[in-house]
Amino acid sequence: MPAEATAINMAARASIWLKPHRIVLILIALALVLCAAFFMRWDWLPQYWEMGLMGIWRALWILAVTCALGFALAVPLGLAQAGGPIWFSAPAKVFCTVIRGTPLLLQLWLLYYGLGSIFPQYPWIRESWLWPYLRQAWPYAVVALTFSFAGYEGEVMRGAFAGVPRGQLEAARAFGMSRWKIFRRIWLPQAFYRALPTLTGETVLQLKSTPLVATISVIDIFAVSSKVRQDTYLTYEPLLLLALIYMTITGILVFVFSRIEARIPVKIG
Amino acid sequence: MKRRTTLDSNPGAKLIDAFLPASAAGIFELLSPVAPGWGATLLVGLLHSLEIAIGATCLGLLIGTAGAFGKLYGGPVTRDLLAVYTTVVRAVPELVLILLLYYAGTDLINQVLAAMGYSRVDISGLAAGIFVLGFVQGAYSTEVIRGAILAIPQGQIEAARAYGMPPGLMLRRITIPAMLPFAIPGLANLWLIATKDTALLAVVGFFELTLATRQAAGVTKAYLLFYVAAGVLYLAVTLFSNLIIGRVEAWSRRGMPSVKEAR
C-alpha cells in the first residue's frame, strides 16, 4: 500500500503544480531549448568536453577547499568579535570590514600581481620549498577566495555566537565545564546551527565568485569557455552552456544543503 | 630593479622597493593628480564606477519594484516568469551574466536597428554597464522589496483600499513609506554589492577603477601601491555609504517604536 499511497500523493502534488499555463510555459521553454540545440553550433563539444570536465572539477575543488578553510578562519574571527578582548576584536573587525568593503577581483589581483611581484625580490623565498607553489596562480586564488569567505562568514558567525542565550553558557559553567569544553560542546554547535541557513547562501555566492580565478590564469570551467570562444569565434553557445552548468551546480548545492538542514534539530534555544 | 644589488642587506628598503620598483618617483609623485602621476586616472575610474553603480541601483530599484508587484499581485504567467527571472539571475555568476548580456544586449539593439533600416551604433560602455548590472540588481531587489511589502501589516493596505485609494496613490502614500524600514537594510546591502560589482566590468574592458588601477600598475610596475590605493578608495566609498545609510535608516524608522526599548 505505501508505494501506491506515495504514487497518489505525488500525482496530487503534480496536479497542483502543473496548471494549464505552466504546461504552455514548459512547452515554450522546450521549444526554445530545441531551437538552441538545432540552430546553434555545438560541433565543438566533442573536442572540448574533456577539458570542460577538468574545469568543472577544478572549480568544485576550489569551492570546497576555500569554503572549508574560510569557515575554519571565520570561527575565530566571529568569536573574537563576539566576546574577545579589544586587541582581538579590533583586528578581526578591521579584517572583515576591509574584505567586505573591497571587490574580490581587486583583492585577487592585489595578491597575484602585487605580492607576486614582491616575492621574487627576496632570494630566501626563491630558495625555499614554497617557491614552486608561489610561482603558480592557484595558491593566490585559494588564499583570496578563502579570505573573502572568511570575511563574510566571520560577520555571520559573530551574530551567531552573540545570539546564543547567556543562560546556556552560564548553565555550562555551573556544570563545571572548562572554557574549551563550553566552547566545543555548547557555544560552537549552537552558533553553527544558527549560521547554517546563511551558510547555503554564502556557499552559492562563493560558487559564483569562482569564475574570477580565470582572470589570473587558473583554468576553471569559465576559462575553458573563454578558450572555446576564442578558438571558435562563437559568442553565445559556450556562455549559455556555462550558465546552464552553473545553474545545475547551484541547484545541487541548494538541494544538498536543504537535506543537511532538515537533519538539524529545528528548535534553537 | 637596478637598486636591488646595493640594498640587498636592508629589508626595509626592499619593502619600499616593492612599492616603487625601478623608478625614482616617490609614492606621492606616482599618486599625484598631475600628469606624471596616476591619481587623476584612478579618480576618473572611481567616477565611472560610481556612475555605473548609481545607474544600476536606480534601474534595479525600478525593475525590483515592478517585479515585486508582479510577483505579489500579478497573474499566474507573470508570477512564473518573474520566478524564472529571479532564480536564473541569482544562480548564475555575475561575470557570466555580464558577458552574456553585454554581447546579447548590444547585438540585439544593433539587429533591431538594422531591421528598422538604421545603421549600426556603438553602444557606450556606460549604458551597457548600467543595463547589465541593473538587470542583475533587479532580481535581487525584487526579492528584497517583495519581502518588505509582505512585512507591512496587511490591515494598512486593506484600510487604504477601503478608503477607495487608486493603486498609484496607495503605492505612493501607504505601501512605499510603510515598506521602507523593512526594505532599506536589504537595499543598502545591494548598493554596496553594486559598487563592488562594477569591478567585474573591468573584465569586459570598461574603464572603471579596477581597470584604471591595472593600467596604472602595469605601466609603472608599482603593483602593490596602486592596488592598495584602489582598495582604499573602494573602502572609503563603502564606509561613507554606511554613514549615509545609517542616517536614511533612522529617517525611515521615524515614529516607529524602537526595538531596543521593547526588549
Image (cartoon, grey):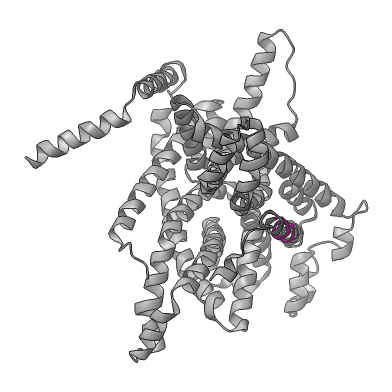
Residue B263 in sight in this render:
yes
Q: How many marks?
A: 0
Kindly identify the residue that appears in the image at 45 percent across and 80 percent down.
A166
Kindly identify the residue that appears in the image at 69 percent across and 14 percent down.
B113
Report the quarter where the N terminus of chain A lies. Answer: top left
Residue A129 in sight in this render:
no
- Quarter of the image for residue A248 reads top left
Kindly identify the residue that appears in the image at 55 percent across and 81 percent down.
A84
Kindly identify the residue that appears in the image at 50 percent across and 37 percent down.
B86
Q: How far across and how far down the image is residue B18, in percent? A: 74, 67
| Residue located farthest toward the top when viewing the structure as drawn | B117
Q: How far across and how far down the image is residue A127, in percent? A: 57, 71
Q: How far across and how far down the image is residue A161, in percent? A: 47, 73
- Answer with left or right where residue B209 lies relative to residue A209: right
B247 in magenta: yes
Residue placed most toward the observer, B4 or B183:
B183
Residue placed most toward the observer, B211 or A186:
A186
A254 in magenta: no
Magenta segment's dominant SS is helix
| Residue located farthest toward the bottom when viewing the structure as drawn | A176
Q: How far across and how far down the image is residue B34, in percent? A: 93, 53
Residue placed most toward the observer, B62 or A52:
B62
Report the quarter where the C terminus of chain A lies. Answer: bottom left
| Region rendered in magenta | B242-248
